Image (cartoon, coloured by chain):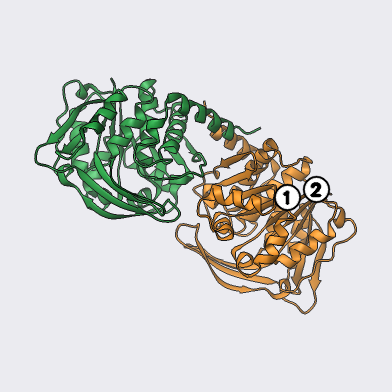
Chain colours: A orange, B green
Amino acid sequence: MSLLVVGSFGIDTVQTPTETREDVIGGSAVYFSYAASYFGPVRIVGAVGDDWPTECTELLQSRGVDTSGIEICEGGQTFRWTGKYMDNMNDRETLDVQLNVLGDFEPRLSDSARESKYVFLANGGVDMQLSVLDQCPNASMRVADTMDLWITTQRDKLLELLKRLDGLVLNDSEAILLTGDKNVVRSGKKILDMGPRFVVIKRGEHGAMFIDKDQIFVLPAYPTADVVDPTGAGDSFAGGMMGYLAANDLDADLDSMKAALAYGTVTASFNVEGFSLERFQQIEREDLEARMAEYRRMLTLP
Amino acid sequence: MSLLVVGSFGIDTVQTPTETREDVIGGSAVYFSYAASYFGPVRIVGAVGDDWPTECTELLQSRGVDTSGIEICEGGQTFRWTGKYMDNMNDRETLDVQLNVLGDFEPRLSDSARESKYVFLANGGVDMQLSVLDQCPNASMRVADTMDLWITTQRDKLLELLKRLDGLVLNDSEAILLTGDKNVVRSGKKILDMGPRFVVIKRGEHGAMFIDKDQIFVLPAYPTADVVDPTGAGDSFAGGMMGYLAANDLDADLDSMKAALAYGTVTASFNVEGFSLERFQQIEREDLEARMAEYRRMLTLP
């Protein structure tokens, strides 16, 4: 089992223009691990409170996710997020955040987790991300996500983290915030100067861009009319991408990353078709492959 | 000569975050015809004032554009547009518009122009667009562009136009404005219900989407770090698209439209690398083909 993800477990309340769902399962590591599980084994590490429903852990286990790294903090509450999506289903507003047990979570990896070859540092504090890197000295692919909060409040630590990463995955607005350059291609190149071998810039409904020192490519999102809830799309994208790389023992060469981003794109396209993990629970790997074939046809020029 | 474009000739003043250019050549029909000229012959129709520089007409002639349909309105002034681009080089603000001779231009096509098989109604008033359709009864592909101004102020006429079109090309924000549906895929489908066989939704730096009753596809923009001036990108895109279709006598089947949108994308990617027609003046068809090969490689999944 070579893929490890560390990040948040969440209980979310999501408002869309047509519906509100209260207290649904969420969190960056949860979406990531479910998405990655379509491709191969994945180990999840993170903290939850007493309020975390046992059946959510069982749901991940049913997908083959190794949940032994979930730390239940007695007397604590799970991270909670409440957000509202605008009419375009792309822009959103955070109405409430309660860090709870995520606030001072210090991951302590098991001996076997420390041997993970593919390590994904999902969204969470930079201290937590750095600590995981310290504990995984033999990882061959270290990739992190980040967000505006950490770019703004923990910039120095984030720059330290970047020097130790193989890849960074982030939104276009975050790339601009991190570098101060409003051209996405140039901002990606500036991030390479900060350390990572590659950068993947997520653009929501507009797809994703890959940049390393030699290459740039862009893949569009899979076009869908049925966006129900975009929460977790970026984490599902990263889960599909890393799950594919880890399952096939691939490095970050161009062909591998193209396929990985394509699988991430297709995986995320299912996720947004339902609230929480609802749509994922309806699909199997063969559904991903069928849509992947459609996506491939879409991109094939005559 | 089977491709006809009717639209605006403009004298533009363009402000970008780093530079301002005053009184440069522009206009929807001008960008379109220059872009289309890489693929085959194109005939341009429109009105200019006394102030239109002769050398601009000669520039189009040097590309093989048939300029006999340019009407010089004595004592009149050419359409003028002044715009300012924001730091992201995608959003822009119109600072000043003077319709001038464009305001009451009534195109009178020559007998040979009336036989055009491919007709593109570039941005301009809906009356002008309808009049051209009346004069081209034998066209087999009638495609129009439109903009928020006409959607808001001439909606009924625009709906009449839509019933007579094969295809509509417009921005995503305009598709949303026209249909009231904020999902781009659904808005495209709703436009099909208004008449055209196909819709092409331009998304600026995010590429373009094609929708007909059977198919949807998305192609990303060619990623560039060197956006100097986006003015005319949409018109250049349409020019490349229609130029390719007309030169190869193609209909709107899936393979033809995929190749056409790809050529439009690549053509527009050069246009934005300079002010006005400056970058176009440095390139030949072989430069388009070289970038097309790169674009094709970019989209080829392993």
**Relative image position of residue B253 (x, y in whole percent):** 43, 27
Kind of residue sitting beneath label 1: Asp
Q: Nearer the viewer, residue A178 or B144?
A: A178
State yes or no: discs 2 and 1 in contact (Cβ < 8 Å): yes
| Residue plotted at (49% across, 48% down) | A225
- Where does the image place residue A57, in percent across and percent down from the top left? 76, 62
- Residue type at tag 2: Ser
Q: Seen in the image, is A228 located left or right of residue B125?
A: right
Above or below — where is A224 with respect to B33?
below
Lateral position of residue A194 relative to residue B200, left or right = right
Mark 2 chain? A
Quarter of the image for residue A54 reads: bottom right
Q: Residue at x 75, y 77 (%)?
A: A76
> Mark 2 vs mark 1: same chain?
yes
- Is any atom of residue B65 visible in this view? no
Mark on residue A140? 2
Numbered mark located on residue A166 in the image: 1
* Image-quadrant location for residue A28: bottom right
Residue B95 higher or lower than A97, as above or below: above
Query: SS at mark 2?
Result: loop
Q: Between disc 2 and disc 1, whose residue precedes?
A: 2
Q: Position of residue B33 (x, y in %)?
A: 31, 31
Q: From the viewer's perspective, is residue B293 above or below residue A104? A: above
Q: In which quadrant of the rendered image does the C terminus of chain B lie?
A: top right
On the rendered image, what quadrant is the N terminus of chain B found in? top left
Towards the viewer: A290 or A3: A3
In the drawing, what numbered circle is on residue A145? Answer: none
Q: CA distance from mark 2 to mark 1?
A: 8 Å
Tell me where residue B300 appears, x and y as whole percent: 60, 32
